[in-house]
Image (cartoon, helix red, strand yellow):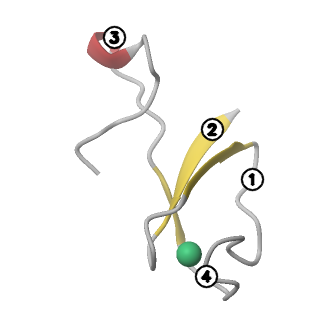
């Protein structure tokens, strides 16, 4: 499971692969993988710096 963020509207979701269309802006967006792999954010697993 990875965390994805819509590069257009900032919508975040968790999935193995990002959806083709963003559920929020209903457009074909670029999804950024913001899964945090560093130990200091293992509680939430999301990198807030992105
Ligand atoms: Zn979007």
Q: Mark 2 and mark 1 in contact? Answer it, CB < 8 Å.
A: yes
Give the structural element (helix, strand or loop) at label 3.
Answer: helix
**C-alpha separation, residue under disc 4 versus residue under disc 1:** 18 Å
Mark 4 within 8 Å of ligand 1, using the beta carbon = yes
Task: Indicate whether 40 appears above or below 49.
Answer: above
Q: Mark 3 points at which residue?
A: 39
The residue drawn where x is 67% and y is 74% is 22
The residue carrying pointer 3 sits among few (fewer than 14), some (14 to 19) or many (20 or more) residues within 10 Å by Cα, namely few
Pointer 1 residue Cβ closer than 8 Å to ligand 1: no
Q: In which quarter of the image is residue 46?
A: top left
| Residue at 42 percent of width and 25 percent of height | 37
Q: Callout 4: helix, strand or loop?
A: loop
Q: In this view, does 7 lie to the left or right of 3?
A: left
Q: Is mark 2 on a helix, strand or loop?
A: strand
For marks 3 and 4, the one nearer the N-term is 4
Give the residue displayed 59% in from the left and 81% down from the top. Answer: 29
Dot placed on the residue nearer the N-terminal end, 4 or 1 = 1
Tell which circle, 2 or 1, labels the residue nearer the N-terminal end.
2
Mark sitting earlier along the chain (3/2): 2
Instruction: Tell which tag, 4 or 2, sits nearer the viewer.
Output: 4
Label 1 neighbourhood size at 10 Å, few (<14), some (14-19), many (20+)?
Answer: few
Question: Circle 1 is placed at which residue position?
Answer: 17
Q: Mark 4 to mark 2: distance in Å?
A: 20 Å
**Residue at (75%, 53%) from the top-left corner?**
17
Q: Position of residue 34 (x, y in %)?
A: 44, 46
Q: Which residue is under mark 2?
A: 2
């Amino acid at each position: 499971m990875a965390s994805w963020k819509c590069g257009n509207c900032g919508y975040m979701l968790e999935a193995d692969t990002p959806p083709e269309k963003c559920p929020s802006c209903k457009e074909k967006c670029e999804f950024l993988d913001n899964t945090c792999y560093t130990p200091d954010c293992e509680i939430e697993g999301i990198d807030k710096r992105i």
